[in-house]
Image (cartoon, helix red, strand yellow):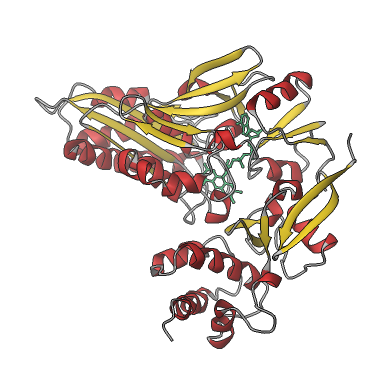
């Protein structure tokens, strides 16, 4: 049913990279397979060589240090992020995002790294990580490099990985003080892929309450996670109130070019962008004020 | 080599198994076709319905969405491993007693999701019970009775009777 392949289960990152270099272009990585196996079962993807990295235990970790921020190994399962006390305390938005990502069964096996590398513009983690200004560590035969999450998605299901590279770590800096971050997505049922979604980060100046920085990122509104920069501009430099958040939603909606499918027309989704940007921004603003 | 049989060692329902499988075998295919453990059901084979839910190292996972080889070295529990001989597990007992089972097709998956929940969290809230079986589709819409049965089982398992 799934096309046949030669199978490898490397135990270390070096072994995995050696295999990727050896079979350049003809090999595919599988982590939890929660996205991969769906496309393979439909015959949309075949590979000569399958490199199963799920067993690389060294890439399964969550570490936090106030200065360095949060480090998540690429093979950390969604459920571990959702349930991590460190994340719930310092990066609550990541845990909240995970609570609405698929179902427990999928979160128990699928990995954060696999989600990002799948490159689905409807995925939930990337927009939140972009709002958090996160970076990714990639390892390849030439060594390691760091790339902004924002630069990672290139097109629908395409990411900036070279054939001999893999994702090893997600790096999330500690947010500036007086920052609030929240995400909201429109779901047909809880845990469904978002019809549209928004992640918003707002940083206030402690002396006058002016918005110093805003990051607004949309899911399922373009071929990649979309920064709504026009909407951000509406907020930066102002003392925020609800009508400004409404305006930001309206601008974001004009920046979006959402897909059309059974869950909604482009027009409907654009309307929903207004609603979900405003909701996420309202929550982010409350949190920034409380921070 | 493609098509080559690969060695797989895992524990299924407490029994160590050593087998040879083709790399493109799904865990659910291994369980049903090779090990003849047909209690695990296949609904959609597309990671949508949860009928094929088993426990891997105590966690609920969809066996249609895991390669058999990925279970290497792990402990897999299927519905056949839940009862103790003829004695039903409290979750199964409660489901029978309180009429949670309608057509029964989703039941093995429901039991496996409930078992993973109660092992991790013996006193779940109603919301946590709902969330635990959110990924198990019951086409009869029999959710309320499942939720009640899982709560009753939780109470029994905590020694409440
Ligand atoms: C029913 C269902 C509902 C879902 N709902 C949601 C949802 O609401 N929101 C959401 O965001 N996602 C959702 N998903 C998607 C899914 O949960 C994730 O995309 C999945 O967890 C991916 O992780 P994985 O480890 O299974 O990756 P895999 O499927 O193994 O891999 C995905 C891709 O990433 C590559 N890859 C994996 N790891 C690495 C690595 N470390 N380095 C380089 N390349 C790598 C693979 O080659 C492949 O191309 C859903 C999936 C299902 C089945």
Q: Position of residue A45 (x, y in %)?
A: 75, 36
Residue at horizontal 48%, vertical 46%?
A80
Name the residue nearer the viewer: A81 or B13: B13
- Residue A208 makes an appearance in the image: yes
Q: Quadrant of residue A75?
A: top right
Q: Where is residue B27 drawn, in percent x and y?
A: 74, 54
Asked whether, in this view, residue A218 is left or right of residue A285, the answer is right
Asked if residue A170 is positioned above or below residue B120 in the image, the reply reads above
Q: Position of residue B13 (x, y in %)?
A: 70, 66
User: How many discs appear?
Assistant: 0
**Front-lying residue, A238 or A77:** A77
Residue farthest toward the top in the current orientation of the protein: A142
Q: Quadrant of the C terminus of chain A?
A: top left
Percent of width and height locating residue A217: 40, 31
Query: Please, which residue is most extreme toward the left here?
Result: A207
Looking at this view, is A175 or B103 the one in front? A175
Residue B89 is left or right of residue A82, and the answer is right
Residue at the (52%, 22%) spot, across then down? A137
In the displayed structure, would residue A70 be above or below residue B142? above
Quadrant of ligand 1 in image: top right
Can residue A253 be spotted in the picture? no
């Amino acid at each position: 049913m799934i096309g046949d392949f030669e199978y490898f289960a490397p135990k270390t990152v070096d072994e995995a990279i050696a295999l990727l270099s050896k079979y350049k272009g003809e090999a595919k990585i599988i982590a939890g397979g929660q996205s991969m196996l769906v496309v393979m079962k439909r015959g949309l993807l075949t590979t000569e060589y399958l490199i199963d990295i799920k067993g690389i235990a060294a890439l399964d970790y969550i570490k936090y240090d106030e200065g360095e921020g949060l480090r998540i190994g690429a093979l950390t399962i969604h459920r571990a992020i959702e349930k991590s006390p460190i994340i719930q305390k310092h990066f609550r938005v990541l845990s909240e995002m995970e609570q609405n990502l698929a179902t427990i069964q999928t979160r128990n096996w699928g990995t954060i790294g696999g989600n990002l590398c799948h490159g689905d513009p409807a995925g939930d983690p990337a927009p939140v990580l972009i709002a958090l200004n996160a970076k990714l560590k990639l390892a390849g035969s030439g060594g390691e490099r760091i790339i902004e999450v924002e630069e990672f998605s290139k097109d629908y299901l395409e990411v900036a990985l070279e054939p001999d590279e893999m994702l090893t770590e997600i790096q999330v800096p500690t947010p500036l003080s007086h920052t609030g971050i929240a995400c909201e997505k429109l779901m047909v049922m809880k845990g469904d892929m978002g019809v549209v979604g928004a992640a918003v980060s707002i940083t206030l100046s402690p002396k006058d309450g002016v918005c110093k920085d805003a990051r607004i990122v949309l899911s399922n509104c373009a071929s990649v996670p979309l920064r709504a920069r026009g909407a951000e501009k509406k907020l930066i430099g102002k003392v925020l109130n609800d009508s400004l958040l409404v305006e930001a939603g309206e601008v974001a909606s004009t920046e979006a070019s959402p897909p059309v499918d059974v869950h909604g027309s482009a027009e409907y989704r654009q309307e929903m962008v207004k609603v979900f940007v405003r909701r996420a921004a309202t929550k982010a603003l409350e949190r920034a004020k409380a921070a | 080599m493609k098509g080559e049989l690969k060695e797989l060692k895992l524990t299924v329902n407490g029994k160590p198994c050593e087998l040879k499988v083709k790399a493109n075998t799904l865990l659910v295919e291994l369980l049903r076709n090779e090990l003849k453990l047909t209690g695990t059901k296949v609904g959609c084979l597309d990671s949508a319905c949860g009928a094929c839910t088993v426990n891997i190292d105590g966690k609920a996972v969809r066996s249609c969405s895991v390669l058999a080889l990925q279970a290497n070295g792990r402990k897999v529990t299927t519905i056949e491993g839940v009862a103790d001989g003829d004695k039903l597990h409290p979750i199964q007992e409660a489901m029978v007693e309180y009429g949670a089972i309608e057509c029964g097709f989703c039941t093995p998956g429901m039991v496996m999701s409930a078992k993973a929940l109660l092992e991790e969290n013996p006193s779940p809230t109603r919301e946590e019970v709902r969330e635990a079986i959110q990924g198990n589709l019951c086409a009869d819409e029999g959710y309320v009775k499942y939720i009640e049965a899982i709560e009753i089982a939780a109470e029994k398992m905590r020694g409440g009777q």
